Image: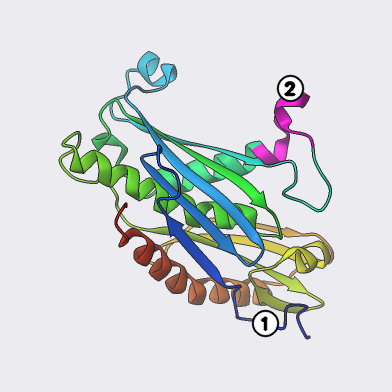
Amino acid sequence: MTRPSGRSDTQMREMTLTPWVNKYAEGSCLVKCGDTHVLCTASVEHKVPNWMKQQGKRGGWITAEYGMLPRANANRIDREAIKGKQDGRTQEIQRLIGRTMRAVVDLHQLDNITIKIDCDVLQADGGTRTASINGAYVALAQALDSLAADGTLEKSPLLGQVAAISCGVVQGTAVVDLDYVEDSNAGTDTNFVMNDKGELLEIQGTAEGAPFTSEQLSTMMKMASDTMPLIFQKQKEALGQKRS
């Protein structure tokens, strides 16, 4: 199969992670994965959710919000605030982002601190949730480093890195990092979230056309695993850039 983009089956789109793009947020990153662009920010609040207080839980919390700007797609979409509620897809994605960020942080060290991550899709061409996770990690790491630098925390409570990539089966062939054309025609669409130890944090897979086999799942998992080091390296390079 020849992919519309001309990429090989195992080749991800060109990814850039530009740090410190917001002058106010404690952490920020603009992630571009092909024509998918997402602005990620991390904001520090010196309080925790009421449910933590009510349950007597100590430590801190990390949560996320996700949204698509009106012209992120070819056709304008209304802001969800106009509708008065978030749709199920939005809620599912932002919960995914929050879960994956909490998985690589020792929350017990965040004493009475909440970090809110905002992922705003500026332009969508498939893979917005995986791009959001990859950029959110950079913004989160920056925010945690800032808390350590100003003495609020003794050290950053990061336990490792986290990254995500999509894989799918298109016309019977497993491919990595689907763009919109491939995603909309895929028989199978799967998202993999992993840490830098090679461990899986989450798999979201759906047979949107025909059922997929265990062999195809294994192929996609290997593609995702082989791609992760490239993303981790880009995250490290972004975090190595100083705030101007």
Residue 20 or residue 103, whichever sits in front: 20
| Location of residue 148 (image quadrant) | top left
Q: Residues within 10 Å of mark 1 (few under 14, many from 20)?
A: few
**Label 1–label 2 contact, CB within 8 A:** no
Outermost residue to the top: 54
How many labels sit on residues?
A: 2
Report if residue 157 is visible in the image. no
x and y percentages locating residue 145 in the rendered image: 26, 46
Mark found first going from the N terminus, 1 or 2: 1
Q: Which residue is mark 1?
A: 7
112 displayed left or right of 192: left
Q: Is residue 150 above or below residue 72?
A: above
**Residue 53 in the image, given as x and y percentages of width and height:** 36, 16
Task: Tell me what residue is drawn at x 24 percent, y 36 percent.
Answer: 109
Q: Is residue 122 above or below residue 226?
A: above
Where does the magenta region start and end?
78-90
Q: Amino acid at mark 1?
A: Arg
Foreground pick, 18 / 124: 18
Residue 160 horizontal side relative to residue 193, left or right? left
Instruction: Check residue 208 in the rendering and tell me which mark sits there, or answer none.
Output: none
Residue 89 shown in magenta: yes
Q: Position of residue 160 (x, y in %)?
A: 32, 57
Confirm whether residue 134 shows in the render. yes
Circle 1 sits in a helix, a strand or a loop, which is it?
A: loop
**Amino acid type shown at disc 2:** Gly
Residue displayed at 67% across by 63% down? 35
Q: Secondary structure at mark 2?
A: loop
In the rendered image, the residue lying farthest to the front is 244
**Picture residue at 42% right of the left edge, 21% below the top:** 49
| Mark 2 lies on residue | 84
C-alpha distance separating marks 1 and 2: 41 Å
46 drawn magenta: no
